[in-house]
Image (tube, helix red, strand yellow):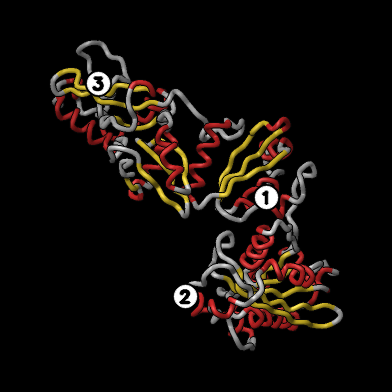
Amino acid sequence: MTELLRRLAFVDLETTGATASADRITEIGIVEVDDEGVREWSSLVNPGMRIAEFVVRLTGIDNEMVAAAPTFAELVPEVRARLADRLFIAHNARFDYGFLQNEFKRLGVDFHAPVLCTVKLSRKLYPQFHKHSLDSLIERHGLRGDGRHRALADARLIWQFWQRVHAEHESEVINAAVAALAARPTLPAHLDASLVDRLPEGHGVYLFFAEGDLPIYVGKSKNIRTRVLAHFAADQESARAMALAQRVQRIDWIETEGELGTLIKEAELVKRLQPTESRRLRASEEFCSWRLAEEEPGLWRPQLVTAGGADFGTDSGLYGLFKNAREAGKVLAAVADEHKLCKAILGLEQRPDGQPCLAFASRKCKGVCAGKETKTMHSARLLAALARLRIQVWPYGGPALLREGGVAYVVDRWRYLGEARHEDEIWPLLEARLPAFNPDFYKILVKVAGRLTPLPSRG
């Protein structure tokens, strides 16, 4: 680490927006510091796309300024040479480093460097302060510079902050902080070490495979890289975590547009691949629900309905989604206890004809079984008690879309049909056989039901 601190690159970028996978760089500023001195370099970059007006107002870089600028592809040799074998230092480094990695990746070039974030460095060395934005550092440390929000000007400010840190702290303290913050995460020896740099930092799912390409785990995260590395950072904390880390022979991932896509993709992959260590979303044919039936005038009793006994997308009289009959019984018993319903009437308890249930003597049943409460009143209270468990009926007469970013998720009767990025990809999904109702997809989709857009009939 001491040797690395002798070759530094203070970097700042201006961009068309905040999303590294979609937006592009408009300006690069680099301040190189080493034993030979300090050198500065910057260049405007033609992003190949329009710059939004609010970005123009923030940076002062407009579309006319970048029209004749070199593209990033033309700047690759220069940028690589200036960053080679240097500690990459930036304020909110994840942003700048992520943009550069994406620009290189579009050209089929791998770019990796040890990274230090000065936001994190400021938090570590100045914990008494709450704000660590670049504007806060400028005010707090008296940094000076013109052209705020231009790449080279901001890179110079980061370099000034670095000098101020060295004026206010002992070298040993700084070196220890940098070593902790710039430490390179590691993977188990049997995995490809380059994965550390290739793992994306956005929403998505990741897959662990054992020997023979056996899927053993599917996980999700808003930051795939952080979550995957956390698995191995914690592999000594439990026997299960250690065993999983030792079994993984290959890691794959799928990036998504956001949280909704991540939830859907995780559920889809777990159902399809049946990974041995992902138990929460494993497919089950035993799921069931309660349906109320009027067995005699005024008396409603719950009946257990299994997967093949109802249309869970259109049946309006179903209550609860349970993994199996045992779970359904436990939930119904808890509802009975909470609302003083009769477990004998609910079919949860056997009693001799004409005898009250066991709970009546302790006043935990209001006495429908002993003639102290009417059957109609007990049924009304049962309906009210189960209302919160009622399965929502599909609100449309046909399929609908859920949009997130550039993706449309196609759903029908709470069944997930697939995703489409173009309109002509939607119709083949509708022509396929309707999949079976899946409780996990229902639980995901019903939470975002307000975002559903009914799909018009094909004209």
Per the image, the residue denoted by label 2 is: 54
Residue at the front extreme? 459
Q: Is residue 177 visible?
A: no
Residue 45 sits in quarter = bottom right
Q: Is residue 109 visible?
A: yes
Residue found 49% across the figure and 47% down from its top: 261
For mark 3, does the 10 Å Cα neighbourhood hold few (<14), some (14 to 19), or many (20 or more) residues?
A: many
Question: How far apart in space, not on screen, are marks 3 and 2 (Cα)?
Answer: 66 Å
Per the image, the residue denoted by label 3 is: 345
Secondary structure of the residue carrying numbered label 2:
helix
Comparing 455 with 214, the one in front is 455
Residue found 61% across the figure and 88% down from its top: 146
Return the x and y of residue 112 as percentages of the image width and height. 74, 60
Q: Amino acid at mark 1?
A: Leu
Which numbered circle lies on residue 229? 1
- Quadrant containing the C terminus in the rendered view: top left
Residue 103 sits in quarter = bottom right
Task: Evaluate if marks 1 and 3 touch, with contact meaning CB atoms under 8 Å apart.
Answer: no
Return the x and y of residue 80 as percentages of the image width and height. 76, 67
Q: Amino acid at mark 2?
A: Phe
First of labels 1, 3 by sequence position: 1
First of labels 3, 2 by sequence position: 2
Question: How far apart in space, not on screen, are marks 2 and 1 (Cα)?
Answer: 36 Å
Comparing 115 with 400, the one in front is 400
Residue found 46% across the figure and 43% down from its top: 425
